[in-house]
């Protein structure tokens, strides 16, 4: 029928796609009634040369597999990679095909590994480079790349998320592709958010963090934080990326030299009502201050400690904000005791004690912060030895 009545088949696929998008129950019923083998057969016929029908088949497949990654078998996974390779110049087919990749890989480690072995990673980074001005392709490819670095399948004891991140960077130039793509969308905060989010997922090794700086990524991130301060989600993702690359001690110093601390404090102050921005800001400053007394001085003198305490006041019930702020205060004074009294004068002891009393998860970090501030902390011996045995 696909050969003799392509328009009719296309109409059926469009209706099927709309039905599947309505709710998961529709997709589940379609799968139960054998929709996947029919779509696969249509897909094979369309792949022979009818690009319009191919696009409809991929759209239908992506709708069907949303939340049902087990549907795709080995034949389907191989055909998906082949389809992306043969239609690399078509933005529409590439976008729909990558959406199928995304649905196939979310919470499915075996599909991830199978697609990586089949060569999907260069197709994903290549799609961003080839269609660097097509927002939909870049968004889908970024999303798919992030999913390749997830460890979200409870059916396997461990995944290969770290290995996949290494392959994306080392074998496919992932960092350069993302940074170059960011330059193509200066006025699109949504795409920039996706690119920054993906960048932070790939900064998993010391040398990768340095590579981001060497490729000009740090300048891009600091400029985005300074110039796009009104876009809350973008600010959050930029902060997350800065936090990720600051795992490298040399990059910590580079961020501070580039004016990163001032822009982070400014972002936290501007978005004080957002617990997510406050948490990410404190986390980024916390990493910058770790083992770096000079950076701690810059942060304190730039109002970082005050901003963190204001965030604690604004979000007393947000455990993430309280925890990251406590860790920041601790790092600021751990190797710079001269800052203890000025921070205490800002009311730090009461706020940290309240966080400790309110949130069980803050117990250890709050104690550490109070201890390093010079406050009295009653430390408990959780385990003691009694005649060669441990006793509570």
Image (spheres, grey):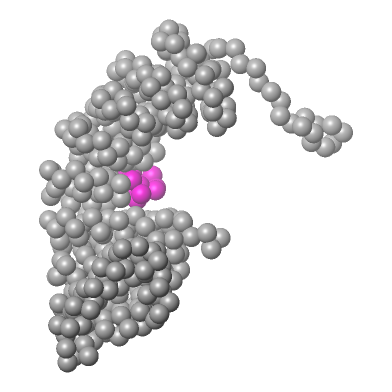
Q: Residue at x 47, y 17 (%)?
A: 351
Q: x, y (%) of residue 259?
A: 24, 27
Of residue 230 and residue 124, the one placed in the foreground of this image is 230
* SS assignment for the magenta stretch, majority: helix
- Compared with 297, 163 (above or below) is below
Q: Which residues are magenta?
A: 200-210
x, y percentage for residue 265? 29, 24
Residue at (28% x, 23% y) in the render: 269
In the picture, residue 81 is in which quadrant?
bottom left
Q: Residue at x 30, y 85 (%)?
A: 41
- Image point (28%, 61%), residue name: 172
List x then y, in percent, for residue 357: 56, 22
Q: Quadrant of the C terminus?
A: top right
- Above or below, 85 against 353 in this view is below
Query: Which residue is nearer to you in this view: 299 or 346?
Result: 346
Q: How many marks?
A: 0
Q: In the image, is residue 8 part of the stretch drawn in magenta?
A: no
Q: Is residue 143 left or right of residue 293?
A: left
- Residue 66 pos. (x, y %): 35, 65
Instruction: Locate residue 147 relative to residue 159 in the image: left or right.
Output: left
Tell which of 90 and 381 is nearer to you: 90
* Residue 392 as seen in the image, left or right of residue 23: right
Occupied quadrant, residue 281:
top left
State the quadrant of the N terminus.
Answer: bottom left
């Amino acid at each position: 029928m696909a050969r003799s009545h392509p328009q009719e088949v296309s109409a059926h696929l469009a209706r099927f796609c709309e039905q599947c998008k309505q709710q998961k129950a529709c997709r589940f019923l379609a799968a139960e009634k054998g929709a996947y083998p029919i779509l696969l057969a249509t897909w094979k016929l369309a792949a022979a040369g009818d690009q319009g029908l191919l696009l409809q088949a991929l759209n239908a497949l992506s709708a069907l597999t949303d939340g049902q990654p087990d549907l795709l078998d080995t034949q389907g996974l191989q055909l998906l990679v082949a389809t992306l390779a043969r239609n690399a110049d078509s933005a529409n087919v590439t976008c729909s095909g990558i959406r199928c990749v995304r649905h196939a890989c979310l919470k499915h480690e075996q599909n991830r590994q199978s697609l990586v072995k089949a060569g999907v990673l260069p197709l994903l980074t290549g799609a961003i480079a080839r269609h660097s001005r097509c927002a939909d392709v870049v968004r889908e490819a970024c999303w798919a790349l992030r999913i390749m670095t997830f460890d979200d399948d409870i059916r396997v004891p461990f995944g290969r998320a770290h290995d996949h991140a290494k392959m994306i960077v080392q074998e496919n130039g992932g960092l350069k592709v993302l940074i170059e793509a960011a330059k193509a969308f200066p006025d699109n905060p949504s795409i920039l958010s996706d690119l920054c989010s993906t960048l932070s997922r790939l900064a998993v090794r010391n040398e990768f963090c340095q590579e981001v700086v060497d490729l000009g990524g740090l300048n891009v991130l600091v400029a985005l934080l300074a110039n796009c301060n009104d876009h809350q989600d973008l600010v959050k993702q930029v902060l997350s990326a800065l936090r990720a690359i600051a795992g490298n001690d040399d990059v910590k110093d580079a961020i501070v030299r580039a004016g990163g601390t001032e822009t982070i404090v400014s972002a936290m102050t501007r978005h004080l009502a957002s617990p997510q921005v406050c948490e990410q800001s404190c986390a980024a400053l916390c990493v910058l201050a770790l083992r770096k007394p000079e950076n701690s001085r810059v942060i304190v003198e730039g109002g970082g400690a005050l901003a963190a305490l204001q965030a604690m006041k604004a979000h007393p019930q947000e455990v993430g904000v309280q925890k990251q702020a406590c860790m920041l205060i601790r790092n600021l004074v751990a190797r710079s005791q001269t800052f203890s009294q000025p921070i205490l004068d800002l009311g730090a002891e009461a706020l940290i004690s309240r966080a400790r009393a309110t949130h069980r998860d803050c117990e250890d970090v709050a104690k550490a912060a109070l201890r390093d501030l010079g406050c009295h902390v009653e430390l408990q011996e959780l385990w003691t030895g009694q005649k060669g045995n441990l006793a509570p």
